[in-house]
Amino acid sequence: MKTRITELLGIEHPIVQGGMHFVGLAELAAAVSNAGGLGIITGLTQGTPEKLEAEIARCREMTDKPFGVNMTFLPALTPPDYPGLFKVIVESGVGVVETAGNNPSEWLPMLKEAGVKVVHKCTSVRHALKAQAIGCDAVSVDGFECGGHPGEDDVPNFILLPRAAEELEIPFISSGGMADGRSLVASLAMGAEGMNMGTRFIATQEAPVHPNVKQALVEASELDTRLIMRGLRNTERVLTNEGVERLIAKEQELGADLKFEDILPEVAGIYPRVMKEGDVDAGAWSCGMVAGLIHDIPTVKELVDRIMSEADALIQQRLAGMSAA
Ligand SMILES: Cc1cc2nc3c(=O)[nH]c(=O)nc-3n(C[C@H](O)[C@H](O)[C@H](O)COP(=O)(O)O)c2cc1C
């Protein structure tokens, strides 16, 4: 399938794997790229320029297809070495960067000069327009359903995507709640040029996480996510578990007095415990409502091929048969 996104990113299928902390390692990124999509290594999971450089090299050993690096800008007491990380990205010849969390304008000149394509992930039309204005090549439009940080506007993709299509000139991909051929065809119908998936890619054979995490996603329904940290204006959609229920009890008890320190035990250092050790009840880890659509743990290639053949069947058969003419 050819779209403005497949052309921009040099990929076969319009399917992107969003950056995911402690999930977006070389194994998953390479598997997605080998399957014809765009795999993405999560920069901050590596943390230092040296480790990111090694992870990019490891990914390159596993695929000769294009892949990207996610750079997330988070409020942090000790910020990561962003200049060093971006330098490694440029010097390693990575073709695509997915930025998220804050305005990436500071880094655009060096990325543009190196010919790196920038896809900025945002949760509102106004942020998407800002990304377009500062020179991003494309945006990933993340609806309220998404795993991770949906922002504070709470606009689901059935509204957000057509609104993005009304306003944007640069190409955009849908993100949040995407799982299958139906998601892809619906995204294209609403004006997107492809789709980004996070949660769905975790439940694959190649995702380098503990089997308990994949099983938790298969067992979860669309009712099993919770929004946390709303009071801190840092809303995150996570899979509910014992740690998350403890966190929510604190939020209810402390109300407007809640401080980040109050919930540190449920949010700090959780990712390695969940993703590496399989302690899925340890605390807050991002998960989308799309968990309700995840029923199996295929290989990445099986998943991508299935999405493309479902999309093709929907377009050629179901929709073609409904022509209003
Ligand atoms: C476990 C997990 C970790 C994530 N970590 C990051 C991250 O570090 N940076 C980022 O920009 N997005 C992160 N995301 C968001 C994804 O890139 C993607 O935007 C989101 O998962 C899309 O929604 P979906 O889960 O419904 O597919 C994460 C999502 C999940 C599920």
Image (cartoon, rainbow, N blue to C red):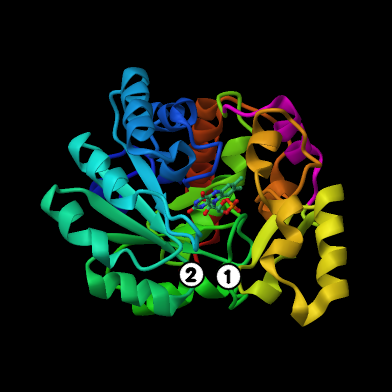
Left or right of 3? Residue 272 is: right
**Residue 136 seen by the camera:** no
Q: Is disc 2 in contact with disc 1, using a CB cutoff of under 8 Å?
A: yes
The furthest residue to the top = 61
**Corner quadrant of residue 64:** top left
Left or right of 227? Residue 323 is: left
Mark number, residue 161: 2
Left or right of 221? Residue 196 is: left
Task: Determine if the C-beta at disc 2 is less than 8 A from ligand 1.
Answer: no
Identity of the residue drawn at 34% across and 26% down: 54
Residue 18, horizontal then vertical, whole percent? 47, 47
Magenta stretch, overall SS: helix
Identity of the residue drawn at 53% across and 39% down: 307
Residue 14, horizontal then vertical, whole percent? 39, 46
Tag 2 secondary structure: helix
Segment colored magenta: 208-221
